[in-house]
């Protein structure tokens, strides 16, 4: 008897099992055969839904970033001022940076054998948080809290600052790093708060 597959459900299961394997074994350590075995679907099904292992990982990374954006959108309304949103964002970034797939993405992006298209897509994941930062700055401009001449440049500098601090998540105590995130917002606000 021929098995029938719900295409979306099949895709979801394959992605879920692949995420678990990538998190445990890394990108290079996970094969399509591993994903096939863990998901219960043939390698042909895996390739049908994702074309190759890189595209499967990019799908997972994009989905993870979509979830990040939705999570921020859910908590952002709790903060009424742009200033409060900026502090909340710094904590949000710090507390939502440690994802198992992050190291896998870094492994993949650093591998010279990775296709340029995949590397570009991985670097493109920054669009979601950068848009969230930009929205906060624009809100601050609109409410008269912030004086910003260059929204794009300000957003880029803020994102780079938070990204640099995130590199210390695995090497610093949580409270110490949290203090540095808050201090970075203090310093940043001193340059953009309307006088």
Image (tube, rainbow, N blue to C red):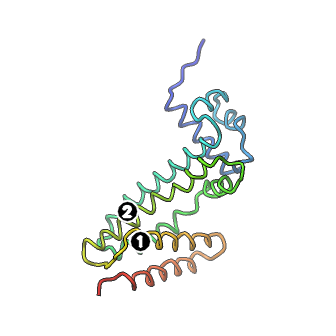
The residue most toward the right is 29
Question: Which residue is pictured at 52% across the width and 71% down the height?
Answer: 160
Look at the numbered discs 2 and 1 and tell me whether their residues touch, using CB distance below 8 Å: yes
**Depth order, front residue of 32/3:** 32
**Depth order, front residue of 137/152:** 152
For label 1, the SS is helix
Q: Position of residue 129 (x, y in %)?
A: 45, 61
Image quadrant in which you'd find residue 44: top right
Up/down of 135 relative to 26, above or below: below
Q: Position of residue 158 (x, y in %)?
A: 46, 73
Answer with left or right where residue 138 lies relative to residue 183.
left
The crowd level at tag 1 (other Cα within 10 Å; few <14, some 14-19, many 20+) is some
Question: Which residue is pictured at 56% across the width and 78% down the height?
Answer: 175
Q: Distance between the residues labelled 2 and 1?
A: 9 Å
Q: Residue 79 carries which label?
A: none
The residue most toward the top is 1
Q: Position of residue 190 (x, y in %)?
A: 39, 86
Answer with left or right where residue 44 lies relative to residue 165.
right
Image quarter where the N terminus lies is top right
The residue most toward the bottom is 195
Sequence-first disc among 2 and 1 = 2
For label 2, the SS is helix
Question: Which residue is pictured at 39% across the width and 84% down the height?
Answer: 191
The crowd level at tag 2 (other Cα within 10 Å; few <14, some 14-19, many 20+) is few
Image quarter where the C terminus lies is bottom left
Q: Residue 75 carries which label?
A: 2
Circle 1 is placed at which residue position? Answer: 88
Q: Where is residue 104 in the image (x, y as percent from the top left)?
A: 65, 54
Question: Which residue is pictured at 47% across the width and 73% down the height?
Answer: 157
């Amino acid at each position: 008897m021929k098995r029938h597959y719900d295409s979306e459900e099949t895709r979801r299961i394959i992605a879920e099992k692949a995420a678990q394997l990538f998190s445990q074994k890394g990108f290079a350590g996970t094969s399509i055969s591993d994903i096939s075995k863990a998901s219960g679907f043939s390698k042909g099904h895996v390739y049908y839904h994702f074309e190759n292992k890189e595209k499967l990982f990019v799908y997972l990374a994009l989905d993870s970033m979509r979830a990040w954006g939705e999570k921020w959108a859910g908590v952002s309304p709790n903060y009424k001022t742009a200033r409060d949103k900026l502090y909340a964002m710094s904590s949000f970034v710090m507390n939502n940076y440690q994802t198992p797939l992050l190291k896998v993405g870094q492994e993949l992006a650093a591998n010279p054998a990775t296709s340029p298209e995949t590397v570009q897509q991985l670097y493109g994941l920054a669009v979601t948080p950068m848009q969230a930062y930009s929205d906060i700055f624009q809100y601050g401009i609109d409410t008269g809290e912030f004086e910003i001449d260059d929204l794009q440049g300000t957003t880029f500098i803020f994102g780079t600052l938070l990204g640099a601090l995130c590199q210390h998540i695995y090497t610093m105590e949580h409270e110490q790093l949290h203090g540095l995130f808050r201090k970075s917002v203090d310093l940043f606000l001193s340059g953009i708060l309307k006088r």
